Image (cartoon, helix red, strand yellow):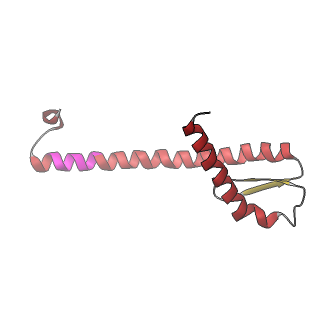
Amino acid sequence: MGNNATSELKKRVMADDALYQRYGKKLEQEHKGEFVAISRDGAVIISKSDIEVLQKALEEFEAQKQRVLEVVLTLRWEIQELQNSIDRIVFELYGVSENELG
């Protein structure tokens, strides 16, 4: 494993530990012997079955990821539209065309 991969793995372990300390630790007493999956935003899935936790986490967290990606794509499109408007204003202000800059 290269240094970069090792560094990324260490960062991931630290981030996962921080998530557990923040959201999972308080569940230990009430859910002793159970498994937990914790999303980056703190959503938890708890079950006595590790397979069930994994399956539910893959479904639920993937759905969250898809919703976030949809929002990101919409925002990117809106930003691009704003940039296009700004470009048109600047070109008009300085009396140049996009072709003249190329």
Residue 57 placement, left or right of 5: right
Residue 23 sits in quarter? bottom right
Residue 56 placement, left or right of 86: right
Q: In percent of the image, x 69 and y 64: which residue is there? A: 22
Give the overall secondary structure of the magenta segment. helix
Q: Nearer the viewer, residue 14 or 41?
A: 14
Residue 17 sits in quarter? bottom right
- Residue 25 at what x, y percent from top left? 77, 64
Q: Nearer the viewer, residue 29 or 45?
A: 29
Q: In percent of the image, x 56 and y 38: which residue is there? A: 3
Range drawn in magenta: 84-91
Residue 95 sits in quarter? top left
- Residue 16 at what x, y percent from top left? 68, 53
Residue 77 placement, left or right of 54: left
Q: In percent of the image, x 16 and y 45: which residue is there? A: 91
Q: Residue furthest left?
A: 95
- Residue 53 at what x, y percent from top left? 81, 48
- Residue 58 at what x, y percent from top left? 72, 43
